[in-house]
Amino acid sequence: MLRPPIPLAVRPFYGVLAANAVALLPPWARGMLRLPRPPLVEPLAVRPAGQVLTRAIRWAMHPPEREPN
C-alpha cells in the first residue's frame, strides 16, 4: 500500500490524483504493472474527479496578473 508523506487530511485528494494517473496509462502499461481497470468506476468517478482536482490545482497555482505601471 502506498503511504505518501503528506498530512492525513489531504490523502484522499492525493488518492484521486494517483487513481487518475493510473487511469491515463495505456492498456499495455497497465497490463505490465498488473493494475486492474474497474469498468464503471474509472469513467464515472475517477476521471471526472481527477479533472476537477487538476483544474483546481492549476487555478490555485496560476500566477497573479501583473498590475500595469
Image: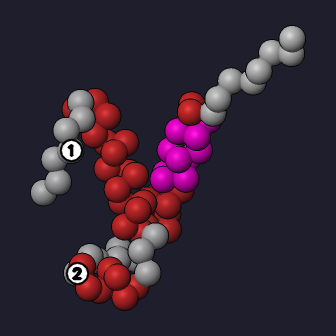
* Along the viewing direction, whichever of 68 and 23 lies nearer the viewer: 68
Q: Nearer the viewer, mark 2 or mark 1?
A: 1
Query: Given the image, on which type of amino acid does mark 2 rest?
Result: Arg
Q: Quadrant of residue 69?
A: top right
Residue furthest front as drawn: 69
Quarter in which the N terminus is drawn = bottom left
Tell which of 63 and 50 is nearer to you.
63
Residue 68 position within the rendered picture, expressed as x and y whole percent measured from the top left: 86, 15
Q: Residue furthest right?
A: 69
> Which residue bears the numbered disc 1?
4
Q: Amino acid at mark 1?
A: Pro
Q: Secondary structure at mark 2?
A: loop
Picture quarter containing residue 42? bottom left
Q: Is residue 30 above or below residue 67?
A: below
Whether residue 66 sits left or right of residue 29 in the image: it is right
Query: Can residue 33 be seen?
Result: yes
Residue sitting farthest toward the top: 69
* Magenta-drawn segment: 49-59
In percent of the image, x 75 and y 24: which residue is there? 65
Tell me the residue that label 2 is attached to.
34
